[in-house]
Amino acid sequence: MKNLNFLHLALSLSFAFFQISPASAQTTAKQASSKFATLLNMLDRLYVDSVDMEVLVETAIVNMLEELDPHSVYFSADDLKEANEPLDGSFEGVGVQFNIFKDTIMVVSPIAGGPSERLGIRAGDRIVQVEDEYVAGVGVTTKDVIRLLKGPKGSMVKVFIKRDGEKNLLEFNIERDKIPIFSVMAAHMVEPTIGYIKVSRFAKTTMEELRSALQTLNDAGMKDLILDLQGNGGGMLRTAIHMSDEFLSKDKLIVYTEGRTFPRENTHASYEGLFEKGRLIILMDGGSASASEIVAGAVQDWDRGLIVGRRSFGKGLVQRPIKLGDGSAVRMTVQKYYTPAGRCIQKPYDNGVESYRNEKYDRYENGELLSLDSLDLPDSLKYATRLKKRTVYGGGGILPDIFVPIDTTSNSPAFRTLLRKGLMSRYALEYVDVNRIKILEAYPTEDDFVNDYTISESEIAKFRAWAESEGTEDDPISISEEDWAISGDAITLRLKAFIGRNAYKQSTFYRIIGDLNETLQEAIEILNDGRFENSKLAHRTFK
């Protein structure tokens, strides 16, 4: 019966798709739909073995979309809900950040304002039982934890917790609630007049967080802003437009979109933003895509600020969600977006999905991450900025105004192994678990920890010995003196950052790790050494 129901859905969908095509294409679309429907019907009636029609149709949809472009994708009902949560800016659950530590669910921190925090659940608590299911010492996985703790708002879940200093298990009946997924990972002053904001995604709630961060930093005396979009893969187009509006004066074109069946649509800045006049630098790299590129493109094209870092990903396609009736959906590419200067920054995808996805490795191989000289930039890709007529380029990502090569100075074999295996974060988790009270007593505030905490030589020696003990015969770990001479400072600072994150909050990590962020450090220098003023930007917008 399930196969028949899915077949009926597939048949109705196959006939429905042609109805949204232009009249000139409807006949061809109808013929193709009829052919597909006939095949499905024959398979269901005549094929020698039983056919899982749902799997068959889903496979056909996935393969069909892969023939179009890399960003038109299919989501099953379950996958769609999971994919939408980061964009919605929330999920429904108990509200804890957790890690699986020694085969036990450890609460890294309760999410501020969430139901677990309200009930008094603390960092360091171990969840050993959920309802009637024991979850300690049984090989629990992250997927298991999510299955047990997430659920509809208002539903109840009972958890039993082991807490240091408590003889008996603590029982908590938690009413699930809507839990925020934060987009602004850090917002602080890196110098007395220079603010820093790290944004990880463009979700429905991002602008509320960003405006709050801008207001806080403005109140703290911010005159210059560094907006970190490194690794930000994008999100919602509307959020990118609103973010750009915070930096551009009213009526300036932010972006326009256009597609085969969609006429050009211009979007302009429409209100007075919170940071329209201060000096602005946006940090980008190869992981900055889509919505990140809209913001950077608008700022660059209007000569409003500098883009610093490396070439962005190059995603200039707009997807529209199309529901398929059974809870599944397709995100179909329907438009391209263009920066105010008319650039489409979509990189080529003519050689297929696999080649498209591997292009980031090609950048490393051809030396682009160390120098932009390796790029071939034909005149056909040249554009001029709107005010100062500076040369910018389209056709494959946003090129930075000031290039910062990838840092290889601390990249020893041992350092790469520690990162790959997550050993620094694991050690920090265990260290904080044992020393949490001692740390918080010695460093009552985040500022105290950031400014004054240092890792002792004896603790570093313990870490090195522990890390090497985590190696196996097939995958040994060795931290030689040569490795330590190259990477020791970076490893030590990362350990401090992870300890700070586990003892205080997520933003503590970014306050500390910023010293290793070469692009951030370069941006600070640019604001201090006169290069910003010499960059031929639209200086009239700056105070």
Image: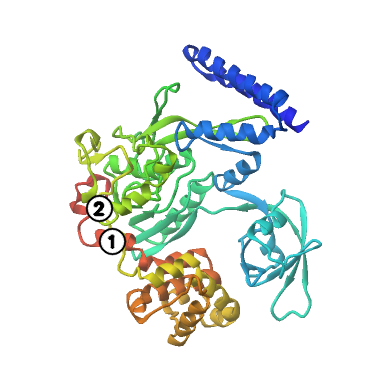
Q: Are marks 1 and 2 in contact (CB under 8 Å)?
A: yes
Q: Secondary structure at mark 2?
A: strand
* Horizontal relation, residue 127 to residue 466: left or right: right
List x then y, in percent, for residue 179.
Answer: 63, 53
Q: Which residue is mark 2?
A: 402
Residue closest to the eye, 169 or 422: 422
User: Looking at the picture, which amino acid does disc 2 mark?
Assistant: Ile
Circle 1 sits in a helix, a strand or a loop, which is it?
helix
Q: Position of residue 53 (x, y in %)?
A: 68, 32
Circle 1 is placed at which residue position?
522
Q: Position of residue 353 (x, y in %)?
A: 44, 39
- 512 over 76 or under it: above or below: below
Frontmost residue, 249 versus 39: 39
Q: Calculate the distance from the C-alpha at mark 1 to the C-alpha at mark 2.
A: 9 Å
What is the quadrant of residue 457 in the picture? bottom left
Which quadrant holds residue 540?
top left
**48 on left or right of 14:** right
